[in-house]
Amino acid sequence: MSEPLQAKRYIGIDLGTTFCAMAYVDAHGTPVTIPNAEGSLTTPSVVFFEPSGQVTVGADARAAAVKHPQLVIECVKREMGERFYNREIQGRKLPPPAISALILKKLKQDAEAKLGPIDGAVITVPAYFDEGRRQATLAAGEIAGLEVLDILNEPTAASLAFAYRDIKRKSDGQDDVMRLADENNKSRIAVVYDLGGGTFDVTVLRIEGNNLTVLATDGDVQLGGKDWDTKLLNASAAAFKAKHQIDPRADEHVFQQMLVAAEDCKRALSARDKARMTITFANKPVNIEVTRDQFEDLTADLLYRTESRIIRVMEASGLSWHQVDDVLTVGGSTRMPQVLKMLERVTDQKPNTSLAPDEVVAHGAAIHAAITQLKRYQKQQQTLQAARTKPMAQAVSEMKIADDNDVLPMVDVDPNADTAANNGIAPHSGGASTATTIAIDSEGSTITEAIIEDANPSEQYDANDATDVLRAIQTRNVNAHGLGVIMTQSDKTKVNSVIVPSNTLLPTSVTRRYGTAVANQTSVSIVVVEGEADNPDQCIPIGKCTIKNLPWGLRKGSTIYVTFSYDNSGRLDVKAIEATSGISANTAIDRTNAMNSVEIGQAKETVKKTTVS
């Protein structure tokens, strides 16, 4: 007989542009930040490729950047989705997921030193990350030897941690029971302003009972605290050049020193009105005094970029500011006074700064991991229990299946989204309009309630403590970017036919009907693009799938059904089917910049053999 099923341990990881954090949910249902091997609650997202072949991640790697700038990689998160990092390291071109995997390996090692074996994690990403960047994050987790339980949007994670913390205790005559909210209370609207080291998101959410629903999201994956640092660096370099007629940025080592000095100056200006930057280049020192007012004037354009996104996301949500109950600040860069002043001016309310900006996203990810992990364990237990009531041969068979397939879905896919027929589509052979919407199935999907057992058979959650609140939590996200296909019109011009508009509630499955372009067409290529502009050239191509070997004799305009299925994590599955023959496309999207399975496998072996400290 198979061995009893063992629950696995999962953690939450905030894989940040400049700093990472990780957390787990303890036996009392409390999210706890996991310190790294150096005892810090955050780990710099910096990788140092030492000449010896060893890799160092974190604070020591950051310090090495001054002496060995050519061997150090920072802010790799900004390049997720690209084929290779922007420069070679030791003569090699490295894919960003492989670099991120080294950071994840360090985090995994440090977590295991505190908790024991770690099987996987929920990894957070900016809400505005597109599909390619999300897939790259999944690849990074796989290369690092982690099962990626889910990809969770950072503002959603922060809101989950906020709502979970802000629980109410109700006496039922026996023990207190924890709830996210009283069922009789009105829903609360929260706006999450998330300004990290390298990315920015703003998200509007509704918290109603134990349901957390994203209403709208916006952001900029190339905007964060590093841009404030760069403004200071460039201004100080200009001052140095004005005095000595040489540019200190020309020296890589001095440039790294200036980066550190700029970040230190920025942090100091969050606490006081003046700070100094010292630059020494070619034996010429310059002390530059910076006031907070000067710094805020210098970076006003960056702050306005976030303000414009706030206005836009509120318009997309259809809400006004008087309907907003909480404005939550997340990310280390929200410590800057100019951010809080702007938010108070725009929202007409004082921002809620009670969350630990560097830890809250990891806490939310850990809560999400606990919910999903415990549900899986419960399902495995149910499978075993059912097997015990069957004949021995059948029971052994089913138990083995459960052992081999313990990766269970978090979301129950809407059965109405599985096939064209189930979507109410009657297949036919021709005469279809090339842009007729046949069925949209968006809000019908349901999330299976998580029934809580213990995360580890040796650790019991306190009764009437975490169990009820974790069991009931449900989250729903929206997609940040519109998704469509390139369609050829009757006049031969090409347009973007949007299938899933931005801010559509997830999970969703949308099917549209198109027609073949010419008679006797033997294959159809479905080019998937991201963006909502009509002109495909203004959109980002993210992949394609192709139906091959179509039957001979198809009329022009013969029906092709295209289905986009988008899950709660923002991951996309594309299916296409020719109506008369039933021939369908490969569901995998061929992403130009993505690592293929062979490359991922090779990178996984390399990272496994690499010593990371």
Image (cartoon, rainbow, N blue to C red):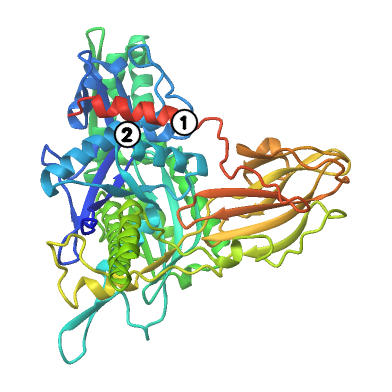
Residue 531: x percent and y percent?
62, 45
Q: CA distance from mark 1 to mark 2?
A: 13 Å
Left or right of residue 261, residue 219 in this image? right
Above or below, 379 against 197 in this view is: below
Q: Toward which corner of the image does residue 544 lie, by quadrant?
A: top right
Judge whether 89 appears above or below 184 on screen.
above
Type of amino acid at the residue the image marks with label 2? Ala
Q: Which residue is under mark 2?
A: 101
In the image, 130 versus 583, the foreground residue is: 583
Disc 1 or disc 2, which is closer to the eye? 1
Task: Give the residue at x 18% y 38%.
Answer: 109
Residue at (35% x, 61% y) in the render: 398
Q: Are marks 1 and 2 in contact (CB under 8 Å)?
A: no
Left or right: residue 170 compared with residue 575? left
Please rate how many residues cluster around mark 2, counting C-alpha atoms within 10 Å: few if below 14, some from 14 to 19, many from 20. many
Helix, strand or loop at mark 2: helix
Tell me where residue 179 appears, x and y as whole percent: 28, 77
Outermost bottom residue: 173
Of 284 and 137, nearer the camera is 137
Q: Position of residue 308 (x, y in %)?
A: 52, 50
Rendered-image quadrant of the N terminus: bottom left
**What residue do we see at 26% from left, 7% from top?**
282
- The reply to whether residue 230 is in sight is no
Instruction: State the residue position of label 1.
Output: 595
In the figure, 452 relative to 563: above or below?
below
Q: Quadrant of the C terminus?
A: top left
Q: Circle 1 sits in a helix, a strand or a loop, which is it?
A: loop
Q: Amino acid at mark 1?
A: Met
Q: Position of residue 136 (x, y in %)?
A: 44, 37
